[in-house]
Structure formats: structure tokens, C-alpha cells
Image (tube, rainbow, N blue to C red):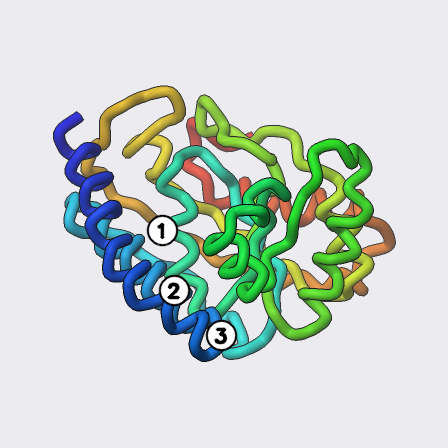
């Protein structure tokens, strides 16, 4: 528990200079780039000070500056602050529509090309159209196709709408397997263990090489599953 509290405190402390520097820069320049970099610095600093170390595998397969649709398994609240700084590029994410109504935060999210999700729109068509525009503009996107954290480290069913997004946008999908975060900070547990963490970047998958979204979904799932430890593998 002490390690987790220390990590959370580090994130809170790092958020202070991020806000004090990043938000004024956003209002002056209209660009969210500095806010992005400071946020990534804060996320990485917090978990490193808590004693966590991350080994990155396969990132050399990615072309610098190219937009990808990144899809990762999700087992812990550690996943976003560990994965996002290691992508090596600016990406968009999806967020609840209500957050866009918060004055300062909402402006930052819009400047960062975040995609709003309306929970009342069950089909999510407006969100998918917005995400397609973001991807085709050259900005990548990070998503978790399971939609929530796995409670046991095994893959949950994938949301099919994200694969419609991939097929419609034509942007290559990069499957990511994050290993160790479930053991470090599993869902429903308020403690942090110091365990090795690995981030596996798999080869990009061109949606044009698949006949339909089900075939692409199966390929992404197979890639992510292939790097999971044996106890968690399908």
C-alpha cells in the first residue's frame, strides 16, 4: 500500500508543474504539444520513482511520425501512464463527452484532438466518424479493445466497433501486449508490487489485407495473446 500511495503522490506532485506550465502554453500557442510532453513526463516519473521499470520490445518496427491505431490489452490502471509515453508520438484517445464541458480540461482535450464518446449513443457512430477524421489527419490513436480492465489478466471480449474504425480509416493497427501490470497493480487491489513490466509492440497490421473486421479482430487478438505469460494465455 505504501508503494502505491507514493506512486499516486508522485503523480499528483508532477501534475502541478504540468498544469502550471502546460495550460498557459496551450492558451498562448493554441497547441497541446507541450502539455502532452509534460503529461508523459509526469506519468513516467511517477511509476519510476515507485520502483517500476519497463522493458520495451519491438518498437523499432514502427515508422517515426506515422499514424497508427494502437490496441492493447488492459489489466491495470498502470497501463495508460506506462504505454502512452512509450509510443514515441502524439496520439488521441477517446473520453467521456461530459469531460469536454469542463472549461480548462475541455479546451485541452479538444486541442489534443481527443474523441468524445456519448454514452447515450449506443451505436457510437458519431464517435467513430470523429475518430476516422482524427486518424486520417495523421494523428494516431490509443485504445483498449476490451473496453475495461481484465480482473484476472486474461483477455476479455473485444469491442467490434473499434475494428470497424480500423477498416473504415485504413490506418494500420499495432497490437500491444503489456505484461506485468496485472501482477503489479491488479483491478480491485489497493497495493503496488515491484515486478518487471514488459511492453511488446507487434508488427503493424494493414486493414486492407483483411476481408472483414472479424478477420482483423482475430489477428489483433492472436498477436496480443501470443506475448502473454502462459497462465494468462488463451
Which quadrant, please, contains the N terminus? Answer: top left
Instruction: State how many labels appear.
Output: 3
> Which residue is disc 3 drawn over?
31
Q: Residue at x 58, y 75 (%)?
A: 66
Q: Can you say whether 47 is above or below 67 in the image?
A: above
The image quadrant that residue 135 belongs to is: bottom right
Q: Can you say whether 147 is above or below 222 in the image?
A: above
The image quadrant that residue 86 belongs to is: bottom left
**Which of pointers 3 and 2 indicates the residue nearer the eye?**
2
Q: Nearer the viewer, residue 200 or 171?
A: 171
Element type where label 2 sits in the image: helix
> Which residue is disc 1 drawn over?
82
Element type where label 1 sits in the image: helix
Q: Give the left or right position of residue 231, taking residue 44 as reference.
A: right
Q: Is residue 223 visible?
A: no
Give the x, y percent position of residue 64: 50, 78
Amino acid at each position: 500500500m505504501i508503494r502505491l500511495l507514493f506512486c499516486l503522490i508522485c503523480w499528483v506532485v508532477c501534475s502541478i508543474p504540468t498544469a502550471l506550465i502546460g495550460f498557459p502554453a496551450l492558451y498562448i500557442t493554441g497547441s497541446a504539444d507541450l502539455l502532452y510532453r509534460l503529461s508523459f513526463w509526469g506519468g513516467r516519473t511517477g511509476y519510476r520513482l515507485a520502483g517500476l521499470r519497463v522493458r520495451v520490445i519491438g518498437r523499432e518496427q514502427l515508422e517515426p511520425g506515422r499514424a497508427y491505431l494502437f490496441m492493447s490489452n488492459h489489466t491495470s490502471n498502470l497501463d495508460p501512464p506506462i504505454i502512452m509515453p512509450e509510443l514515441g508520438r502524439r496520439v488521441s484517445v477517446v473520453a467521456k463527452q461530459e469531460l469536454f464541458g469542463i472549461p480548462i480540461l475541455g479546451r485541452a482535450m479538444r486541442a489534443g484532438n481527443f474523441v468524445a464518446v456519448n454514452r447515450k449513443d449506443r451505436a457510437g457512430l458519431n464517435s467513430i466518424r470523429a475518430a476516422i477524421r482524427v486518424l486520417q489527419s495523421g494523428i494516431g490513436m490509443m485504445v483498449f479493445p476490451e473496453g475495461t480492465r481484465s480482473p484476472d489478466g486474461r483477455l476479455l471480449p473485444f469491442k467490434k466497433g473499434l475494428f470497424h474504425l480500423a477498416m473504415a480509416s485504413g490506418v494500420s493497427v499495432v497490437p500491444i501486449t503489456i505484461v506485468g501490470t496485472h501482477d503489479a497493480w491488479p483491478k480491485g487491489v489497493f497495493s503496488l508490487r515491484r515486478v518487471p513490466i514488459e511492453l511488446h509492440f507487434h508488427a503493424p497490421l494493414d486493414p486492407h489485407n483483411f476481408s472483414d473486421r472479424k478477420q482483423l479482430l482475430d489477428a489483433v487478438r492472436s498477436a496480443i495473446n501470443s506475448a502473454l505469460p502462459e497462465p494468462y494465455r488463451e
